[in-house]
Amino acid sequence: MWRYKSTGIIIGTPAIDSGGSVYFGTATGAFYSLSSNGTPNWTSPFVTGGKGINGPVMVGADGAVYFGADDGRVYSLNPDGTLRWSYQTGGKLKHGITSSPDKSVLYAPSSDGFVYALDAGGKLKWKSKAVSPGNACTVDQNGVIYVGGTNCYMYALNPNGSQKWAFRAYGRITTPATIGHDGAIYFAAADNTLYALNPNGTVKWAKPTRNVVYSASVCDTGGQLIYGAPNGHLVSVNVADGTTLWEQPLSTVIYTSPALAYDGSIFALDSDGVLAKFSGPIAPEPQSATAIAGGLLVTAILARRVRRVG
């Protein structure tokens, strides 16, 4: 285990490349690369000019690093930390960059109300109609782009940027879309509802959630859709009909998306900085490790540093 203290708060999700290097940005606009043992790869961080980096980081197939910043720019860096290119959008980029399945196209949802599609060289391919994006884009295996808006719509965009369909909820969309193994689209909205849509945009089911959900859901191969609830519970529902399979209390509010391991373990981080490991896919028993707030914690053997929370 190692710990690295950055110069600013880390809000966005770090990325790890094939060599184990970790990339992350801070709210002060500094962007870091650390080796797998926690030492800096660069003599100094790349700096955006004091504008925060709040969204997730993405590493391309060629090793290039991509991220968006509050200055409205999409940045692409070489693995050595030098600038490859940047592209100026019309608003802040708080939700990170997503790519097409072959990673040849980058999608950037901007606070100016549009989604920008750029090629790997930083050239604009298209700019969507006004969709008021409030979350990151999600792309399915066919290249269809899904983005939820602050205007209560979930949009499906074709790879050329044209609209495939739009579904209206009764509140702003509060999570990115999750694509199920059957192609269904899952997301939550501020109307206290978890939605499941068919690939054609029709409703598969809608489940009341008591409170607004901000945690993006994850799907496992056994038919579970798992998300964190505002009451601090980790919830699993059946993807077929939305019925609750199990619910486990963790602690306080859960804003982040759970993560699934290959062995079926589930990891969830709550707003108190507690990282919990749930040991199995059905009615799991919780274990936890304390996460470090305001810095970056990377642990290779989590199972050796656990304590009970329930």
Image (tube, rainbow, N blue to C red):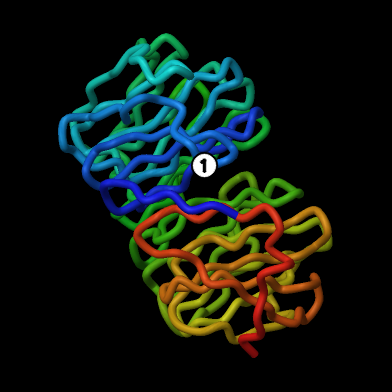
Position of residue 183 relative to residue 237, above or below, is above
Mark 1: secondary structure: loop
Residue denoted by label 1: 38
| Extreme residue toward the left, this view | 50
Position of residue 170 relative to residue 262, above or below, is below
Residue 84 in the image: state x and y as whole percent: 37, 12
Q: Nearer the viewer, residue 233 or 63?
A: 63
Position of residue 42 relative to residue 91, above or below, is above
Residue 118 in the image: state x and y as whole percent: 40, 18
Q: Nearer the viewer, residue 222 or 71?
A: 71
Q: Nearer the viewer, residue 66 or 40?
A: 40
Residue visible at 56% across and 26% down? 100
- 191 relative position to 59: left or right: left
- 93 relative position to 269: left or right: left
Where does the N terminus fall, quadrant-wise?
Answer: bottom right
Residue 171 in the image: state x and y as whole percent: 35, 66
Residue visible at 50% across and 82% down? 232
Label 1 amino acid?
A: Gly
Where does the C terminus fall, quadrant-wise?
Answer: bottom right
Instruction: Residue 113: tell me if it is visible.
Output: no
Rendering quarter of residue 252: bottom left
Position of residue 181 relative to residue 57, above or below, is below
